[in-house]
Image: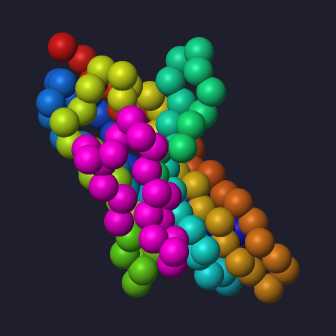
Amino acid sequence: QVRLVESGGGLVQPGGSLRLACAASGGSFSINAMGWYRQAPGKERELVAVISSGGTNYADSVKGRFTISRANATNTVYLQMNTLKPEDTAVYFCNTEVSTPWGKYNHWGQGTQVTVFS
């Protein structure tokens, strides 16, 4: 069973920065893609950024401000968030698609709160 452990959320003022991390562990798997989603109160979960062997993809709302990266040796994905805005406030979830001897699976982290306030 793949386990995702997230860290790095918190409170920050507008214009500030935060860095999220998500480490995948457990079982025998290879990672196809890792990404970050977010869900604000009363809204649907949305893609923030994803990274795979094919490259990176970002939501239009975060392009130029957020950067996703990955440390393959530790199966960890990072999200560097700069110039944060109040509308970035949400619970951020890590997601990974993995391949195992039994097939492909999607896994979610428990979520970490990011609050941007004046």
Position of residue 8 relative to residue 12, above or below, is below
Q: How many marks?
A: 0
Question: Which colour assignment does the render follow?
Answer: rainbow
Report the side of 18 relative to 87 (left or right). Answer: left
State whether residue 5 appears in this view: no
Residue 32 at x, y = what percent?
Answer: 61, 74
- Could you say which quadrant of the image residue 25 lies in? bottom right
Report the side of 53 relative to 100 (left or right). Answer: left
Identify the residue at image location x=39%, y=35%.
61
Say which of 32 and 27 sits in front.
Answer: 32
Identify the residue at image location x=66%, y=72%.
98
Is 52 one of the magenta-colored residues?
Answer: yes
Residue 103 at x, y = what percent?
Answer: 82, 76
Image: magenta residue range: 50-69
Is 27 one of the magenta-colored residues?
Answer: no
Say which of 26 and 40 sits in front.
Answer: 40
Position of residue 24 relative to residue 113, above or below, is below
- Could you say which quadrant of the image residue 45 lies in? top right
Say which of 13 and 58 sits in front.
Answer: 58
Say which of 100 and 35 sits in front.
Answer: 35
